[in-house]
Amino acid sequence: MGFALLLAKDHHSAIALWLGGLIALLCLLTAGAMKSMRGWYIGSIVQIALIAYGLVIPLMYFMGALFAGLWIAAFLIGRKGEAIRARLIAEASKEG
């Protein structure tokens, strides 16, 4: 998002720059909130905002979609990892 702001600074309005700065700030703040489901919901909204910033910088359509794909992959792999972890804990409690 920071690089998109660098591209936008010369050719776009202050509103577009403030909006990009807000999205960048939300990216940083959401990273700290990922321990709860609320953080995942906010992160999903931020991913949509990244794609929507393509209205200002067309390359963000591609970059936003790329990062949204990574976001979805992390969510799905994280769910599988949590299921495996729960299974291992359950097996360990049965043995001990």
Image (spheres, grey):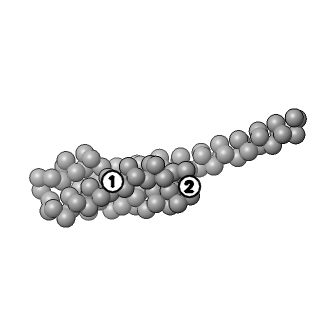
Residue named by callout 2? 36
Quick one: label 1 or label 2, which is nearer the N terminus? 1
Residue 73 screen position, x and y as percent: 53, 47
Count the marks: 2
Residue 25 — which label? 1
Amino acid bearing label 2: Ser
In front here: 22 or 53? 22
SS under mark 1: helix
Q: Is residue 15 above or below residue 7?
A: below
Residue at (51% x, 51% y) in the render: 34
Choose between 78 and 31: the one closer to the eye.
Answer: 31
Instruction: Give me the residue at 36% from left, 61% from top.
Output: 49
Please indicate whether residue 16 sits to the left or right of residue 62 in the image: left
In the image, is 28 to the left or to the right of 83? left
Q: Find residue 17 and report its horizontal and vertical position in percent.
A: 20, 58
Q: Residue furthest bottom?
A: 15
Quadrant in which the C terminus is drawn: top right
Which quadrant of the figure has residue 13? bottom left
Q: Residue at x 11, y 52 (%)?
A: 10
**Is residue 14 visible to the viewer in this orientation of the structure?**
yes
Residue 55's disc number: none
Residue 44 visible in image:
no
Residue at the spot 18% in from the left edge and 53% down from the top edge: 8
Compute the Cα span from label 1 to label 2: 19 Å
Label 2 secondary element: loop
Assess disc 1: are there few (<14), some (14-19) or many (≥20) residues with their C-alpha within 10 Å of its C-alpha.
few
